[in-house]
Image: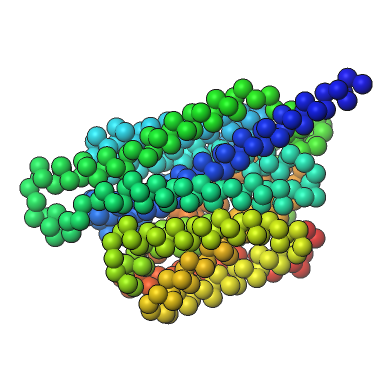
Amino acid sequence: MQTNERQPFVYANMRLAFILLITCFVAWGVAANMTDPLVKVFSKIFTMSNLQSALVQFAYYGAYFCLALPAAFINVRFSYKTGVLTGLGLACLGALAFYPASISMTYGFFLAALFIMAAGLSILETSANPFVMAMGPQENATRRLNLAQAFNPVGTNIGVFLAAALILPNLNTATAEERAAMTQDALNAVRAAELQAVMTPYVGMAMVLLVIWLLIAFVKVPRAENAGISTEQENHDGFPATLKRLMKLPQYRWGVVAQFFNVAAQTCVWTFTIQYVQETIGGTEASASDYLQYSLILFLISRFVMTWLIGIFRPTILLALLGAIGALLCVYAAMASGVSGIWAIVAISACLSLMFPTIYGIALNGLGKDTKFGSAGLVMAILGGAIMPMVQGAVIDTYGATVSYLVPAICFVIVAGYGVFAIRHIQD
């Protein structure tokens, strides 16, 4: 009788925890897509090549790779809630570090601040994704994760809006040649104003992260966070044994590979949209960023549409189909000239909307006690977002932004291949 009396309380707390986790999905969406335009911003402020400025993404996604495994140990030793709070706290510190970075006016300091912030977001994401999957029956865990991830594009749109409203319009119009002709004092004054604009939204985001941290800290989360896994199952036999089991599972092993190239494709497409638009039709950074905003609005709408479609069609079929369409759109953008190529890039976001949570759900399906370390491997695969933009940046420096979209095209082909593999070997 006592258990039955507690059930409404338990369910209410679980619903509240789910809602608060959704705010975390929104938060890291803001951070990721407020960061994308910084590649163009820093290339202008510090007069760097596209390859050098792509170190922004290397620092951001490299931190995801480095902290995902420590996050798994936190989740195994303590709980998903502890992992979420640790991630939020570290991300808050990294966002606050943008203030001293703006005073120092050094590129390296900004990269360090980005690394710390992304390190926190890595822990947050490694904890939050399996946490959501654990909040109900395993048979609809992939759809539940897609629902939670559907709110991530709300954050991505806010992030691009903040960059477009607070950062890009405050860039000085002086060209690289004009900056080179300035005195050091004049150049420092220009950079100080620009970096002040970069700092403001990140410090504001730190305050929001702090509020989310406080709300989650005071919510009592039921032990249902272990996804129905018994205490006996929760007893881990060590990381080496877990890794050995994971590597024997083709759905997981190839899922990590697919996630690497999925995140690579997403980061490449969005990071260099502004450069593509400017090369194709000209205009300022602020006007070119409008098309990035259109992409993310489409991404947002498509996330909810895909969540509905997954209830009708097998996720693996949708993954293979959208991977193939994404590859074709990238090839068209690389070969076309003019506005049609830009709209092809915008349309790619509809394909991307399904991929991350679907690959995640397929790869983790049925892992049981190995889910926490399995989740870490999939977050470490975000390293694709650190490496491939540098490859694309080098291609842009040599051949131009248009041709560079062959890089994400290759990534999409690999994702489509995983979808085909999953159709044949996995019952989802």
Looking at the picture, tell me which residue is in the foreground, 171 or 249. Answer: 171
Query: Which residue lies at the image location 39% right of the left edge and 46% below the top edge?
Result: 162
Q: Nearer the viewer, residue 121 or 196?
A: 196
Whether residue 415 is visible to the viewer of this picture, yes or no, is yes
Quadrant of the image for the C terminus?
bottom right
| Quadrant (top left, top right, bottom left, bottom right) of the N terminus | top right
197 over 212 or under it: above or below: below
Q: Work out whether residue 268 can be spotted.
A: no
In the image, residue 62 above or below residue 403:
above
Identified at 72% across, 33% down, the residue is 14
Q: Residue 353: where, in percent of width, then height?
A: 58, 59
Query: Hey, which quadrant is residue 324 in on the image?
Result: bottom right
Q: Quadrant of residue 252?
A: bottom right
The image shows a total of numbered marks equal to 0
Spot occupied by residue 11 in the image (x, y as percentages of width and height): 77, 31
Q: Is residue 72 above or below residue 305?
A: above
Left or right: 248 in relation to 74 = right
Q: Residue at x 55, y 58 (%)?
A: 299
Residue furthest to the top in view is: 2
Residue at position x 54%, y 72% in the image: 327
Residue 394 coordinates in the image, percent (x, y): 35, 64
Rendering coords of residue 107 (x, y %): 28, 44
Colouring method of the image? rainbow
Q: Nearer the viewer, residue 191 or 61?
A: 191
Residue occupying the far right of the picture: 1
